[in-house]
């Protein structure tokens, strides 16, 4: 009698990547209630502080491996993470989640297009910008310039974040670097976050912040690490172009933010531009490096 080999029931790598993005967008959507209580900076500080404690519990900071030349990049990555998190949370306080994600996505999309060293690739940020215009519908006169401005700052920050993350990822593997940069991000957010949250912190608020920290960035990081072991960075980056669409989906399901047909067309343009830019913007492999640090969305 022959026995049948067990079927492979492992989750496919693209499923892990999509789950990571869903966790990020769900955490963003659920942060809106906390923002209403302690403000965007207070939410960023509490969420990043909880995340820092989790990463410190999971991994010892690789301080002995840090060279003097690494310090500016590590500090810069931590400070950028803190500022981008505040900017993005301030944006979703004012504008729909999907719109904020699409605007923020212009940052990494532009980085990918510039790295392609091709004039054709520079068309992709322009296509995505057209999509953002359709999303914001300025001709209706209801655009929130402050919210769009915060999302734009987050876009610039995410572009800087990706370049710094790749530099740090060339030096450190696993979550060791995050046990350094996330505490720095929490300290950065604390400058504005503590005064904003003062007098509003309760056990319920702390519990909510801890839960959000699991959704952002702990769970996405673990899922992205697993996905990247079985996917090429280009395939992973192309799949990440779906993130603005997932932002619209979670905004609809959790926050009841109903997009119009024109706005859905705008999201489609952003997704197409992101996928095209990633395919053209491949990064040369770093010789001798065994495990890159995932370029997580810094809102986590």
Image: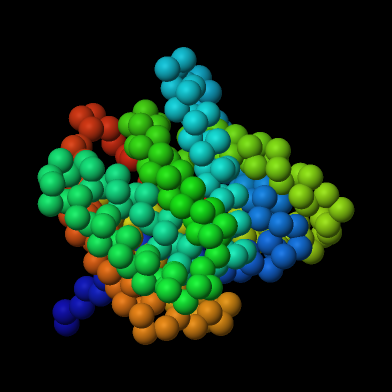
Asked where in the image residue 135 lies, by quadrant, the reply is: bottom left
Taking depth in this image into account, of 115 and 289 the one nearest to the observer is 115
Residue 93 location in percent, x, y?
Answer: 62, 64
Residue 63 as seen in the image, left or right of residue 126: right
Residue 10 location in percent, x, y?
Answer: 32, 68
Residue 128 as seen in the image, left or right of residue 183: left
Outermost residue on the top side: it is: 68
Residue pictured at 43% horizontal, 74% vertical? 139
Residue pictured at 23% horizontal, 48% vertical? 113
Residue 282 as seen in the image, left or right of residue 160: left
Residue 219 as seen in the image, left or right of residue 32: left
Say if residue 151 shows up in the picture: yes
Residue pictured at 64% horizontal, 51% vertical? 44
In what quadrant of the picture does the N terminus appear? bottom left
Residue 294 location in percent, x, y?
Answer: 38, 46
Asked where in the image residue 165 lies, by quadrant, the reply is: top left
């Amino acid at each position: 009698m022959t026995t049948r080999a067990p079927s492979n029931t492992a989750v496919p790598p693209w499923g892990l990547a999509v789950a990571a993005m869903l966790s990020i967008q769900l955490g963003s959507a659920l942060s809106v209630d906390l923002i209403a209580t302690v403000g965007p900076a207070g939410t960023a500080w509490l969420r990043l502080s909880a995340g820092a404690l989790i990463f410190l519990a999971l991994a010892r900071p690789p301080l002995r491996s840090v060279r003097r030349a690494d310090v500016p990049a590590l500090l810069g990555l931590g400070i950028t993470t803190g500022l981008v998190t505040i900017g993005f949370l301030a944006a979703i306080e004012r504008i729909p989640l999907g719109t904020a994600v699409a605007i923020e996505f212009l940052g990494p999309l532009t980085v990918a297009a510039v790295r392609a060293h091709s004039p054709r690739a520079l068309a992709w940020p322009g296509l995505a910008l057209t999509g953002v215009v359709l999303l914001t519908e300025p001709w209706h006169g209801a655009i929130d310039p402050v919210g769009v401005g915060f999302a734009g700052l987050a876009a610039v920050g995410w572009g800087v974040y990706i370049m710094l993350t790749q530099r740090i990822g060339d030096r450190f593997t696993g979550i060791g670097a995050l046990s350094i940069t996330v505490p720095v991000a929490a300290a950065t957010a604390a400058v504005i976050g503590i005064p904003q949250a003062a007098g509003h912190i309760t056990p319920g608020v702390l519990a909510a912040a801890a839960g959000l920290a699991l959704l952002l960035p702990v769970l996405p990081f673990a899922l992205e690490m697993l996905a990247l072991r079985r996917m090429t960075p280009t395939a992973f980056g192309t799949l990440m172009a779906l993130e603005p669409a997932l932002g619209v989906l979670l905004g609809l399901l959790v926050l009841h933010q109903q997009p119009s047909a024109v706005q859905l067309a705008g999201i489609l343009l952003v997704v197409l531009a992101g996928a095209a830019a990633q395919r053209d913007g491949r990064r040369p492999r770093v010789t001798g490096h065994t495990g890159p640090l995932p370029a997580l969305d810094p809102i986590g």
